[in-house]
Image (tube, rainbow, N blue to C red):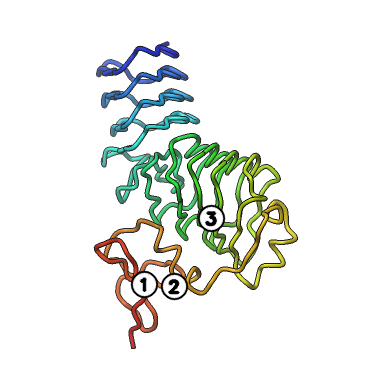
């Protein structure tokens, strides 16, 4: 209906509207703000695809259906909020993303997204050309990364994949041209596709993996295509996942990155008020 209206800068959808159709505002590159009324129950496929000036979106309580790639290529998107009364989607723990509650799947993210520990999968095209940060740490709760999840995130330089991930989809890191380091903590090599790192210069990048799994990664495609494959250091195994995860301050984690309700005997990782992490030994 309004696709390619490059001069459209804002829109207020009234209470009489119950659905936003497929590609309704696709490539409205001048659109900076949108107000969605609480009468809207569905947002169609590609509804805001390519709205590269859109900076924030609020999903009201009434929305129960969001189509495929609805916010793909929204490269300026910094804030996504789902109203707390929504029964299907949420943006829990200030994560700046849309999470499908029933499946714990992150379906749309933005450049400031913090992925909470409750997320179990990252959906297809979740960060597709959406202005990814330079580094992404995926929490230990995630078991799968969908196809095109970080497609063409051209500013992404490093990514940390936890031991829990077992599969990574087609084109998940397609054309991530700045990627230099991948930290994969999985001792069992995650299943990945030939195209997982397609058009990403992994021959110039370094893959960091558990020392016990070096040979397995070196003989398994597409991991074997990395130019350099090295063992994770003791410090990286113990701290790195937490240090980059942007988790809630003053929380306690064990060496595997699992949240603890209190300090346990042995080594704990504590996230401090200044954002740093420290190892603390409890006898």
Real-space CA distance between mark 3 and mark 1, rounded to the nearest whole angstrom: 23 Å
Measuring 75% from the left and 60% from the top, which residue is drawn there?
219
Real-space CA distance between mark 2 and mark 1, rounded to the nearest whole angstrom: 7 Å
Mark whose residue sits in front, 2 or 3: 2
Q: Is residue 165 above or below residue 235?
A: above
Any mark on residue 143, and which?
A: 3
Q: Position of residue 253 (x, y in %)?
A: 37, 69
Disc 3 on helix, strand or loop?
loop
Along the horizontal axis of the image, is 238 left or right of 62? right
Residue 1, located in which quarter of the rendered image?
top left
Measuring 45% from the left and 63% from the top, which residue is drawn there?
241
Real-space CA distance between mark 2 and mark 3, rounded to the nearest whole angstrom: 19 Å
Q: Residues within 10 Å of mark 2 (few under 14, many from 20)?
A: some
Pick whichever, 268 or 98, lies toward us. 268
Q: Position of residue 101 (x, y in %)?
A: 39, 45
Q: Which residue is mark 1?
A: 269
Can you say which quadrant of the picture contains the C terminus? bottom left
Measuring 40% from the left and 18% from the top, which residue is drawn there?
28
Q: Earlier in the sequence, mark 2 or mark 1?
A: 2
Asked if the residues shown at circle 2 and circle 1 are in contact, with their CB atoms under 8 angstroms apart, the answer is: yes
Asked if the residues shown at circle 3 and circle 1 are in contact, with their CB atoms under 8 angstroms apart, the answer is: no
Asked if the residues shown at circle 2 and circle 3 are in contact, with their CB atoms under 8 angstroms apart, the answer is: no
Q: Which residue is mark 2?
A: 255
């Amino acid at each position: 209906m309004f696709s390619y209206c490059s001069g459209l800068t804002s829109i207020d959808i009234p209470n009489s509207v119950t659905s936003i159709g497929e590609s309704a505002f696709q490539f409205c590159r001048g659109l900076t703000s949108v107000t969605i009324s609480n009468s809207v129950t569905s947002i169609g496929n590609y509804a805001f695809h390519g709205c590269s000036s859109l900076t924030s979106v609020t999903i009201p309580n009434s929305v129960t259906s969001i189509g495929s790639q609805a916010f793909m290529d929204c490269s300026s998107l910094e804030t996504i909020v789902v109203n707390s009364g929504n029964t299907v989607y949420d943006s829990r723990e200030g994560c700046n993303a849309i999470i499908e509650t029933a499946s714990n799947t992150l379906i749309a993210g933005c450049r400031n997204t913090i992925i909470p520990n409750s997320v179990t999968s990252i959906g297809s095209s979740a960060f597709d050309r959406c202005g990814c940060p330079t580094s992404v740490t995926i929490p230990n709760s995630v078991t799968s990364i969908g196809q095109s999840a970080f497609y063409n995130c051209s500013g992404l330089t490093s990514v940390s994949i936890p031991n829990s991930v077992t599969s990574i989809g087609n084109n998940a890191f397609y054309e991530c041209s700045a990627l230099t380091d991948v930290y994969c903590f999985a001792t069992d090599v995650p299943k990945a596709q030939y195209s997982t790192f397609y058009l990403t210069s992994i021959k110039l990048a370094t893959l960091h993996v558990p020392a016990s799994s070096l040979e397995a990664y070196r003989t398994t495609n597409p991991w074997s295509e990395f130019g350099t494959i090295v063992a994770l250091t003791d410090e990286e195994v113990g701290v790195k996942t937490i240090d980059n995860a942007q988790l809630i301050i003053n929380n306690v984690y064990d060496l595997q990155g699992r949240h603890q309700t209190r300090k346990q005997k042995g080594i704990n990782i504590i996230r401090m008020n200044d954002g740093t992490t420290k190892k603390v030994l409890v006898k």
